[in-house]
Image: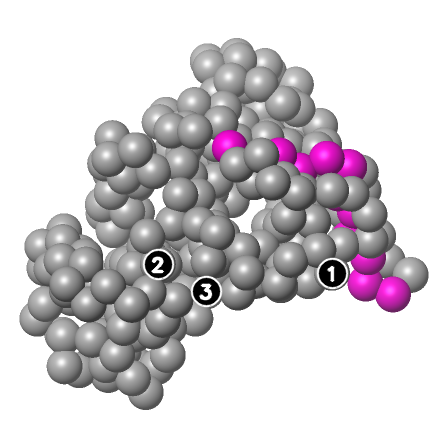
Amino acid sequence: MFTADGISVSYGPIRAVRDVSIDVSEGEIVTLLGPNGAGKSSLISALIGLVPKAGGQTSFRGEDVTGLSTEALVRRGMTVTPEGRKVFADLTVAENLRLGAATRKDHDGIAEDTEKYLEMFPILRERFHSAAKYMSGGEQQMLAISRSLMSRPKLLMLDEPSLGLAPRIVDQIFEFLVKLREWGLTILVVEQNAGDVLEFADRAFVLASGALQFAGTAKELRETGDVMEMYLGLEAH
C-alpha cells in the first residue's frame, strides 16, 4: 500500500534521517521503533508532508506521492495522529471530530462515523459538548485518533500514541488499533513502548541515529537479542 524509498530529512546542516526505506502492506500494523532522537518523528512527518524531504520517493497505492502536500495526501487516504495529540484545546469534542472530516461532503457518513467512535470511546460521548482542554491525556488521545479516522483513511499513521499515558489507557489504545486492523485499516505506528507494540504488530523497523538498523517481522525482532538490547533496551524472547 505504501512505500518510502531512500528518505532523508535535514534540519540545516543536521541530517536527522539518512536514506531510510520502509514499506507497509494492506491490512498490516507496522511499527517504527528506536531510542529518543532516532529520527522516527522526523521520518513520519516527512512521509505525511509536514516537513520537507531532503531526498527519496514515496508511493501510495501505486501512485507517486513524493511531492504532494499534507492536504493532498489526506484526500488520497493517508492521515497522521501527531505526537502529543495536538487536539484543538478550545474546541469541543464535536468540533474536533468535524474538523477531522473536513475533506468529506457525505453528511450521513460523517454522522455514522461519529457515532461509531463515540460508541468505541464512551468518554467522548460524555464530553461531546465540552472543550478538549478539560480532558485527560488519555481522553485527548482517544479524541485525536478518532479525529484522524474521521477522514476515512486507508493508512493511519500514529506518532507515539502511548506517550505519557497510564498503562491501563495504553492497553485500551492498543486494543483499539488491533480492532482497526480487523476492520481492514492499515496502520504505521511510531512507538518507544516496544515491548507492548511488538505483541500485536505484524512487522517492525528499527531506527537509530537516523539510519535503519533492522527490518523484519515482529517475531524476528523479538528474537534478535543484539537489536532488542542495543537499540530498545529489552531482552529478546
- The CA span between labels 2 and 1 is 23 Å
Crowdedness near tag 1: few (<14), some (14–19) or many (≥20) residues, C-alpha within 10 Å: some
The answer to which of 219 and 203 lies nearer the viewer is: 203
Question: What is the quadrant of residue 91 in the picture?
Answer: bottom left
Q: Secondary structure at mark 3?
A: loop
In front: mark 3 or mark 1?
1
Q: Is residue 21 left or right of residue 63?
A: right
In front: mark 2 or mark 1?
2
Q: For the point 30% across and 33% down, which residue is it? A: 184
Image location of residue 24, percent across then percent down: 52, 31
Determine the main secondary structure of the stretch shown in magenta: strand
What kind of residue is marked 1? Pro
Q: Which residue is mark 3?
A: 84
Q: Which residue is mark 2?
A: 151
Image location of residue 117, percent across then percent down: 17, 56
The numbered mark at residue 52 is 1
Mark 2 and mark 3 lie on one chain; the one further toward the N terminus is 3
Q: Secondary structure at mark 1?
A: loop
Q: Is residue 136 left or right of residue 124?
A: right
Crowdedness near tag 2: few (<14), some (14–19) or many (≥20) residues, C-alpha within 10 Å: many
Q: Is residue 21 left or right of residue 55?
A: left
Q: Is residue 140 above or below residue 185?
A: below
